[in-house]
Image: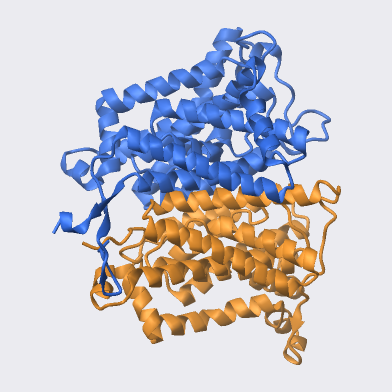
Chain colours: A orange, B blue
Amino acid sequence: MWTEILQGAILASIFASMIRLATPLLLAAMGEMIAERSGVLNLGVEGMMLMGAFSGFMVAYFSGSIWLGVLGAMLTGGLMGLIMAFMAITLKVEQIVTGMALNLLGSGVSLFWHRLLFNKTEEVNVATIQIFQPLRIPGLSDIPYLGEVFFSHRWLTYLAFALVPMIWFFLYRTKYGLEIRCVGENPRAIDVRGVNVARLQYLATIFGGLMAGVAGSFLTLAASPRFVPEISAGRGWLAIVIVIAGNWMPWRIMFAALLFAFLDAFQLHVQGVGVLIPYQILLAIPYVFAILAMMGSRARSEAPRHLGVPYLRE
Amino acid sequence: MTGTRRGLRFPYRLERRSDVGRWAQLAWLIVAIVAALIASGLLLLTAGADVVEAFGALFGGGFGGWREILETLVRATPLILTGLAAALAFRAKVWNIGGEGQLFAGAMAGYWAFTLFAGLPPVALFLVVIAAAAAGGAAVGWLAALLKTRFNVDEIISTVMMNYIVMFFLSLMLSGVGPWREQGSYYQQSAMLPESAQFLVLLPRSRLHVGFLLAVLAAMAIHILLTRTPLGYEIRAIGFNPTAARFKGTNVPKVMAVTLAISGALAGLAGAGELFGLQHRLVMDLSNGLGYTGIIVAMLANLHPLGVVLAAILFGGLTNGAFRLQVATGVPSAFTFAIQAIVLLFVISASILSSFRVRTVSDVD
């Protein structure tokens, strides 16, 4: 098994897949981090991602434009983020239950509309679209191995990685970033300074939804040309795990996302070279690792102290 | 919540009340269900269906006659058990999202017991498979508790991850190389269970099996457990305030482990019912989300064990109604999953709204 895998071409392919597969995880985790930093524990990422994948595909399929598809996915995710924010911040419903409700909503609504739109015409598995093609960076993508690994991806992948330093800058070097970090840590302190706590939390949660939606659109507009029910397959939950494993810090979250993506890329290639391990065991690896990663990450120093706790004045 | 807004004094304010009357809660629940039906009606409009006809089919298919009601009870059986599983855990504020995985773990453990003890007389075999199923579900629940108390792994994460892992394990057992695959079958399924292993059917010409009685008994048992026993008191206490419970001398990790084990066992029994009572073979879509629907059932019942029975029957009817809906109007039966989530969103909002009251500010100051 190892002799087949440890070849230059295969390794380059594994690392290229790693970066590609990290895209949805990283996008969703970055959004979730911002929401959690503001104190809102959004467990609805899975449902938001699924709805993003679904609406992105539908908009692209019926409008013919994949760019509109991404926009549709963003709006859908943002709308679900708004619902999350309204329930969590205005109504102060138990955030865990609200997140679960949004997961079930995404799962139910996407399945319902998918059946509605495609069962009639008997094209359930046939409906495909023209997806985003890799954007090969001129010059750099011709470098052997490195070109394939780093410079031959879809624009959403470049965006996901470009967002890491941008979000880092926003969070640690701007006034709004400081406020968001404070809200999750000590909402009262920020409230007495006259900053609107609810507004900040709303914006952060909606941003988290937008990002989950875009992450979902990567699945149906860049990774594969079709939508199948439950296509998100737990990636939203992995994004939540990645935020915890990354200790709520942008760079560490990027590495955590890459690690999970590596496991996925590795199992794909092990399957590809025809090693006799049942594929179910390979597929389960990231989920088992998620539990193990939680065991390891004892240092949660950056966990927002007010995470999941609604802010009550008085 | 203050009464001032942009400098103007607003004469009313919302405040939380500590005493929420049962009738106020019930009234809000009805408001929530009506609101959810309206939202679902909008969803039906996107399907181009005649809303009145559609709701007629939905209700008629669920509760329109004796046969429909029996079939509704069949659908309600696993939901009572997964609903209880969620309700019990949530009472302790232990967020067991793993009902789905525990259901499958129970079904697999039951099936494994069947393969070992297939020769036993039916009654003994029945007892062995339900014990095994309960143990299978309990083991997965207990593992989540162990991960939480020993290794600080959040139970939400571990139970969700185990849902996926358990499904991959089942897929492996039913795959071409797995031991449970039906010989020569093209599908991922086990062989049909012999009649001696199938659960007793309660009424002739129906599919209502003994699992229904088991589920109702379980609801009563959980009700008694929560209200009349020291363990039930401790479960409620750690849900209310774990720190206070710890100072009172409650062994919180132990109570958590027992809660998750019982919760898992209940979901495991649901799996046994679906396998031995209804489908009679192990298949990948044995459940179709029953574990998740159980969460909604529990919330709708306000985490009350006997309320779970009623909520499960309501949702069982909804599932059946959706099949008639599909036949009568062509609206996909997946409508149930959408409607269930919408009901949950409205019900949890209503449960919060019922705990507020409007008061004039001059009254307080």
Quarter of image, res B143: top left
Residue sitting at the far left: B365
Instruction: Give residue B36's position: percent from left, percent from top.
Output: 53, 44
Compare residues B37 and B333 and report the one nearer the observer: B37
Q: Would residue A133 be found to the left or right of residue B287 on screen? A: right
Which residue is painted at 51% across and 40% down in the image? B34
Q: Would residue A206 be found to the left or right of residue B70 on screen? A: left
Q: Would residue A59 be found to the left or right of residue B237 on screen? A: right
Quadrant the C terminus of chain A occupies: bottom left
Instruction: Give residue A1's position: percent from left, percent from top.
Output: 72, 59
Compare residues A212 and A133 and report the one nearer the observer: A212
Compare residues A1 and B290 and report the one nearer the observer: B290
Q: Is residue B229 above or below residue A9?
A: above
Instruction: Give residue B186's position: percent from left, percent from top.
Output: 83, 35
Instruction: Give residue B184's position: percent from left, percent from top.
Output: 84, 30
Q: Would residue B314 be found to the left or right of residue A121 on screen? A: left
| Residue A191 shows in the view | yes
